[in-house]
Amino acid sequence: MLAKKIIIKGKVQGVGFRPFVYKLAIKYNIKGYVLNDSRGVEIFAQGTPKDINAFETQLRKKPPPISKIISIKSKITSPDQALKGFLIKQSKGSISHEVLISPDIATCPDCLRELFDPEDRRYLFPFINCTNCGPRFTITSSIPYDRKNTSMSCFSMCDNCYREYTNPLDRRFHAQPNCCPECGPKLHLLNNAEKLIAQGTNAIDYAARELADGNIIALKGLGGFHICCAADNEQVVKRLRELKHRPYKPFALMADSIKDIEEIAYVSKEEKEILKGEIRPIVLLRARPNVLPKSIAPDTSDYGIMLPYTPIHHLLFYFYKKYIPQDKFPILVMTSGNRSGNPICIGNREAISNLKEFVSYFLIHNRDILIRCDDSVVRVLGKKGFLFYRRARGFVPSPVFLKHKFPTVMGVGAELKNTVCFIKNDQAFVSQYIGDLKNLDTYNFFLNTIDHYIDILKIAPKAIGADMHPDYLSTRYAKEQDKLPVIRVQHHHSHILSVMAENQIDEEVIGIALDGSGLGPDNTIWGGEILLINKDLSFQRTGYLSPIRLPGGEIAIKEIWRIGLSFLYSIGEDNIERFLTKVPIRKKELIYDMLKKDINCIITTSCGRLFDAVCSLIGLRSSITYEGEGAIVLESIQDKGCDIAYEIPIKNKEDKYIINTQYLIKEIIKDLIKNIPPSIISRKFHLGLCEALAETVKNISKDTGIKKIALSGGVFQNQTILGQMIHKLTSIGLTPIFHRSISPNDESISLGQAYFVANKIK
């Protein structure tokens, strides 16, 4: 007899790993046990050498589909002659652990078959799940992932569910959220006066009928509430926009099937795979024109669409299709259930308090959501994978794997699009999207997220990375942690470090960081930067967009015509009546005078503000209502049949390359005077900016010999900019490095901060 102790680390708890091991053991006549512990899964296996080898081979080759093995270590140990079979033992916990927590998983095909099988005891049961699907991260309070450590702990399993739960050969063996209509959570429908209207399956049926009749409802999902209404009802969509004070920002959609999605959008093979997979994020797709109301996405020709991922969503469509004509599309608006700027609601009482002025009904249940987690948003990049616009449900808390092991540290992120990051050994845990910390509720979400990750990862950070900006609430939080050293990392430096960490690069790179704003060491606002990252991870600023002033400071970020006017002033254009015609002349004169006298004018090199300036000058927007609106509108109107680029001069001043955006604006003004269409101007602008950036890094590469170019910052969520930069850099013999596992926007800042600090204290 040969006996081995086997330790498997990775995403191996809550994914059906122990039943998988049990079945293998029975197949190969192995005696011993398997259990969950702080390291992952522990196996004691005893059998003939031939059987043990076959057992180990299958462990490595065919693990459960939603598991992820990081390492398998085995060692020969003394046989136990008293063993009579193979057991699944109770989990062991300890102070620290190395288990990867599973993200939430969309309802699997097996559960869907049962959900709609009239003969099944879980027929139309809105909380059906098994070992291969259902809630994980959002219901987990601590590790190990056992029922007592989830929000299912208050629901006692009935005899039938308990038999499934304790049978190693059953699909629901140790499925922690396991339940049925007899013992599981209950569903209720309330009106906005909090009167109970219906319960159970009847509640979903009633809600579906109200949606078909043009009403708006709030629905408790997996990581928070959704607000939903009929997407093809222009009147109700416009009403929702008015109620939410959200005039232009696109609404997310949910469709019942790929076939239904193809009625309203173009879908590639790669996009179908992401849409139908186990995660089911929102996928950005090119909209078919004139099918749905323009009010769904007024600013763009793309729709953000997802398929149902919980039984409640599946059932909602099941009933909704009964109440709409056969020639209508079963497409619903499925937007985050929150007030503007607030985090997504997760509690029933919280939702009723915050959302009752928006909705007529609340479809709620009594299973608590412990962790807020918005829907993830991605854009498929053909065969290159996909790009994150928001990383949350389905992906969090899976780590980013680093090239080396590091001390335990944390990064507290930026002010907007905040995330936090914890590095533990060779893994970086970037949290779900948190949001704008200027909002009190979001700041509390930030604090809760930090506490939760420290608890579930069982860690004690040794240092904190924070932004240079002293007024960011994340920076203030870091400074208040008296017992921990705080290392401040410049915003755009963090951006480039994050893409290096994610791609496991530890050599010198040239970084292009393009975004809205970040405080530079010179106390100006950066945002169009080319940085040289040294081997010790320090940086030099080797290039940037030519500076411009923001009259009035932060207000110019909303009133973007001010930035357009600032560019006009900088090129000597004083005939301001001729341009920005949607702005009253008196307002323009006041700001022009402010520029002349240099009163309250902040200097910036921001690429995001350049997009805003162009957007305002060609008449698309004077003011914006959400972050990035100007750039989104500008990108969406491009005439992609145009292949002409604006020439943008590059000058070398004191060993720094400066891209002359004032000259660019002069060329745009010439085209405006010639009545060149905005769609052509937008295209020439996008192509010209990419050519200038590529030419600049080509020069820096010649100076330094560095070939790898790291791309980060929110501007790289622009499909044209990212695609053109990858193409142009590759064509001149350089290697573009970009984000694959996290978003390039400010969600990536916390990873860059943590990576810098971890390297410094290693």
Image (tube, rainbow, N blue to C red):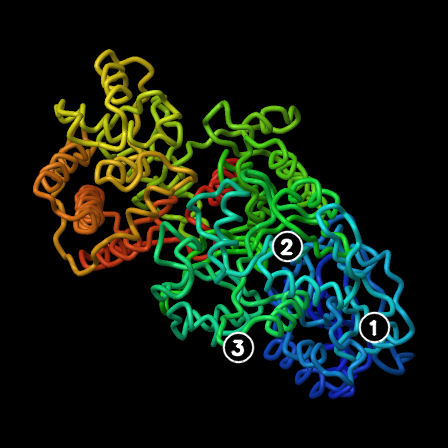
Give the side of residue 507 with respect to residue 572, left or right: right
Dot 3 and dot 1 residues touching (CB under 8 Å): no
Q: Nearer the viewer, residue 569 or 236?
A: 236
Give the side of residue 728 with respect to residue 318, left or right: left
Dot 3 and dot 2 residues touching (CB under 8 Å): no
Q: Nearer the viewer, residue 614 or 12?
A: 614
Residue flagged by tag 2: what amino acid is it? Ile
- Establish if 756 lies above or below 34: above
Label for residue 217? 2
Q: Residue at x 7, y 42 (%)?
A: 674
Earlier-in-chain disc, 3 versus 2: 2
Residue 735 sits in which quadrant?
bottom left
Q: Nearer the viewer, residue 380 or 91?
A: 380
Residue with the mark numbered 1: 165
Give the side of residue 597 with respect to residue 132, left or right: left
Q: Percent x, y for residue 378?
A: 45, 58
Residue flagged by tag 3: what amino acid is it? Gln
C-alpha span from label 2 to label 1 = 35 Å
Q: Percent x, y for residue 110?
A: 67, 79
Residue 206 sits in which quadrant?
bottom right
Q: Secondary structure at mark 1?
A: helix
Residue 202 sits in which quadrant?
bottom right
